[in-house]
Image (cartoon, grey):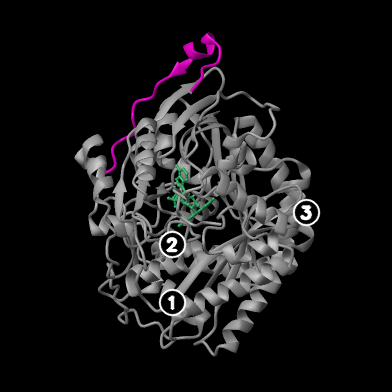
Amino acid sequence: MAQPASEAKASRIVPDPPTPRAPGEEAPDVWGFADSGFQVNAAGEVEFRGSRYAISGKRIPSLLPWAEGILGVRLDPADRRASGYPTALPPRVANEPLERALAERLPAESVSVDPRVRLRHGHGHTQEDMWAIKYGRLARVPDLVVWPESADEVRLVLELVRQHGACLIPYGGGTNVTDALRCPEHERRTIVSLDLRRMNRVLWIDAENHSAEIQAGALGLEIEEQLRRHGFTLGHEPDSIELSTLGGWIATFASGMKKNRYGNIEDLVLSISATTPEGPLARPAVPRESIGADPARWLIGSEGRLGIVTSAVTKVFPLPELRRFGSVLFRDFEAGFAFLRAVQRSGVVPASVRLMDNLQFQFGQALRPARTGLAALKGTLEKAFVTKLRGFEPERMVACTLLFEGRSKEVEAQERSVYQLAARHGGMKAGGENGERGYQLTFAIAYIRDFMLEHWVLGESFETSVPWSEAQALCANVKQRLWAEHAKRGLPGRPFVSCRVTQLYDTGVCIYFYFAFHYKGVEHASEVYAELERAARDEILRSGGSLSHHHGVGKLRQPFLPRVFSPAALAWRSKLKAALDPENVLGCGNG
Ligand SMILES: Cc1cc2nc3c(=O)[nH]c(=O)nc-3n(C[C@H](O)[C@H](O)[C@H](O)COP(=O)(O)OP(=O)(O)OC[C@H]3O[C@@H](n4cnc5c(N)ncnc54)[C@H](O)[C@@H]3O)c2cc1C
């Protein structure tokens, strides 16, 4: 990487490497860490294993009874559909000359053909991915996995793969939710999964210029650990921060929950270094520049098709002086939504503002650990105050969680402004504890999908962005469409369809939907789910929403591309790929 002025170099800090991750820390077959997750205890109640999260080690007795009521089916805690993980693998396509060349040039521990390792590198975290590895089959998985330790090794591997007629798929944390890591079924060449995870260092922090160069394979947690030691943060906090990487964020156009303060990934990245079939791309980072279209920026959202990101120079920010959570209850979704718009219009926007609809609010309540003694009494009194004295209806009320970060005075000013607006919209302050709980739950909730799958409930989330003027109608249309599609197929019970607004912009919002149904007795349930999700996406597009706000296209949403791009735009995309990678070495086949 070319260096800027020498005095800037003098201000650079080289952080120590991140704490090594324990082997086997990540579960291969479900979301998250192997030591954590929902399970049914001997008493038939749900509990959360482990010690990582606020909910860990706690009993959650209301969850299954509440889910039964919502889904309109009986959920017997003892009736579990055991996972068949790992399902059978397709035959490996060996390439002896390539494997020999790799063995000659790289340490033995940099290459693996272990079936379990290859399986894990052949999927991300879509519902279809999880189903396939437990109850179905992946039609194709990588034939070998390589872990480079430097940009030079990335270059070497790409060159060898090209020379030996194989293809390559970059792998970050494997957390995508777009089937981006699924291997094309009909690929006859050897597929190499290039796992960047050993390239996990913050190479330098420029304390004077508030920037840092970070290797692409660093997990969000590793980045924050290395920056925090020197008083900085990147501020990018996707809900998958524990297990996703900088390279993955760049390649998928990611967005973090605190984007109001720090920006989305495209705002944070100043320059990208990458290895491509044409050769390396690397440029110095400057605050902004006008140099025509910068090819390195085409890598943002490229989903592994154009090059391998090896590192990026990003902005970094001093750690906030103060971090405070908050929450507000509103009578209904409309009131909460009007509040969000007022917050955005006021120009005083906290780092994160999220609005949950009623069902999701109820879900949050059902996930409350069992309370006893004084805590239980406090809970009962609070509930009585909200519902009896304030007249909020439990079946309509919604919750908004808030996260304020910054200098103390700034946070206090934001709180004053936000709570004044909340009061004007009939909101009732529900405290920092509930706000913090809401944000903490985000990480634990990520585990619920895999748990429910074994209890005959198939579910997933998907997102979109939409102008303010269309947002409420879009929410209603998508919910209605999913109810109708569920009924049309005569699926058991009732569907769970819920939404939350997670990001605010001057021009609109990002909305997440959560959809699940009981699938016992349903044939080809995963395909049925996929069909319904496609129907929801159709409805989103009809209602003025985007194909995706931040998850990307992968293979999952490829069929919708002609609805969002003109034929000319599609031709540009495919010609760009063909010109930059004529042998299709980067062979993941993404949109
Ligand atoms: C529970 C959960 C919560 C999530 N929350 C969020 C959220 O809040 N915000 C958000 O934006 N997303 C979220 N996601 C989606 C996912 O975490 C993001 O898409 C993330 O950016 C993927 O990063 P990764 O490192 O896991 O990439 P991977 O899944 O490994 O790869 C994704 C794509 O990027 C390519 N790629 C990976 N690394 C590189 C590289 N170095 N160079 C070139 N291409 C590369 C791969 O080939 C693939 O096409 C969530 C997912 C889950 C399961």
How many residues crowd around disc 2 within 10 Å: few (fewer than 14), some, or many (20 or more)?
some
Prevailing secondary structure class for the magenta stretch in the rendered image:
loop
Q: Residue at x 70, y 31 (%)?
A: 292
Report the mark closest to the observer, 1 or 2: 2
Residue at the left extreme, as displayed: 108
Q: Is residue 150 above or below residue 513?
A: above
519 lies left or right of 566: left
Q: Position of residue 87 (x, y in %)?
A: 28, 70
Q: Amino acid at mark 1?
A: Val
Q: Which residue is mark 3?
A: 424
Q: Is residue 35 magenta?
A: no
Q: Which residue is mark 2?
A: 184
- Range covered by the magenta-colored residues: 1-23
Q: Is residue 29 above or below residue 395?
A: above
80 lies left or right of 226: left
Q: Which mark is residue 342?
A: none
286 lies left or right of 69: right
Q: Amino acid at mark 3?
A: Arg
**Viewer-side residue, 349 vs 275:** 275
Q: Residue at x 60, y 30 (%)?
A: 407
Is residue 57 at least partly visible in the picture?
A: no
Query: Is the C-beta of the residue carrying label 2 under 8 Å from the nearest atom of ligand 1?
Result: no
Is residue 323 at least partly visible in the picture?
A: yes
Q: Position of residue 529 (x, y in %)?
A: 50, 76
Per the model, the C-alpha gap separating discs 3 and 2 is 54 Å
Q: Amino acid at mark 2?
A: Pro
Per the model, the C-alpha gap separating discs 1 and 2 is 28 Å
Per the model, the C-alpha gap separating discs 3 and 1 is 40 Å
Q: Secondary structure at mark 3?
A: helix
Q: Position of residue 576 (x, y in %)?
A: 60, 46
